[in-house]
Image: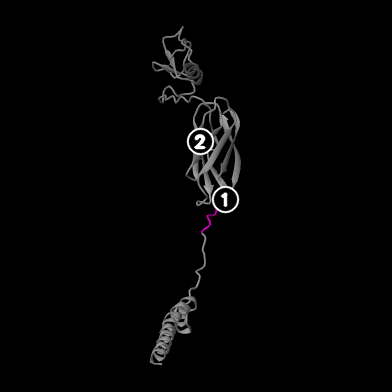
Amino acid sequence: MRATIQRYVLSIALAATTALSMQATAPASVSARQPSAASVARVAPVRAKPLVLAVATSVDIADVTLTRAASGLINKPQLFTAVVTPANATLPITFTWQADEQTPLTVTLNAITSTAVFTWSNPGTKFITVTAENESSAVTKSFSLTLSSDFNLTILHTNDVHARLVPYGVGGTSSCVNNVNSNSVCIAGAARLSTKIQGDPLAGG
């Protein structure tokens, strides 16, 4: 009888121990799967930040301003300057120069200004075209230049005696006669001065 009671008590103690063990481990397992209300309240909510994308935009070329002389001389270098507006137009910019009787010129620059030099050997009106182009736009401008032939200018200085319109007789005479039949020497006079300027080696005075 005593042995039976002992086995019964051991059975009850073993069952109680197993139950306590299960209770001790169960909350941890449940807590891992489902957080308690208190633990949820302590966690601050996470808010998503807006995504900002920087998009590069291209600035178009609005206009091209040309600087050049209105006229010039043949066989003389002529300078042309093209300036793009606005000043913040997207770079690089390709400038293409085309001119009558000239080889086309194309340059790509990290600048809004381009220059070109052309020389012509024939007079007349010459047409020049420049095109400025970047990645999003292109502007073309044309203009003309009138060239004339070169010339030589000679400045001749004469004193008050030789500048007289009427020939003057040296030797005290106020008039001049043919110096072949006279002892007087004729100088000055418009005709004599003109002949001298034109280079007649037989001109006297």
Magenta stretch secondary structure, dominant: loop
SS label for mark 1: loop
Q: Are marks 2 and 1 in contact (CB under 8 Å)?
A: no
From the viewer's side, name the closer residue of 124 and 85.
85
Give the residue drawn at x 53%, y 51%.
86
**For discs 2 and 1, the disc positioned in front in the rendered view:** 1
Q: Position of residue 198 (x, y in %)?
A: 50, 17
From the viewer's side, name the closer residue of 80 and 31.
31
SS label for mark 2: strand
Q: Position of residue 19 (x, y in %)?
A: 44, 84
Which residue is the site of mark 1?
60
* Above or below, 134 relative to 71: below
For residue 42, say whether it is visible: no
Q: Residues within 10 Å of mark 1 (few under 14, many from 20)?
A: some
Q: Residues within 10 Å of mark 2 (few under 14, many from 20)?
A: some
The residue furthest top is: 181
**Which badge, 2 or 1, is on the more N-terminal residue?**
1
Q: Say what amino acid the circle numbered 1 marks.
A: Asp
**Which numbered tag is attached to residue 116?**
2
Q: Which residues are magenta?
A: 54-58
Q: Position of residue 68 (x, y in %)?
A: 53, 39
For residue 6, say whether it is visible: yes
Q: Position of residue 94 (x, y in %)?
A: 53, 41
* Above or below, 197 relative to 26: above
Q: The N terminus is located in which quarter?
A: bottom left
Q: Say what amino acid the circle numbered 2 marks.
A: Ala
Is 37 magenta? The answer is no
Q: Quadrant of residue 20?
A: bottom left
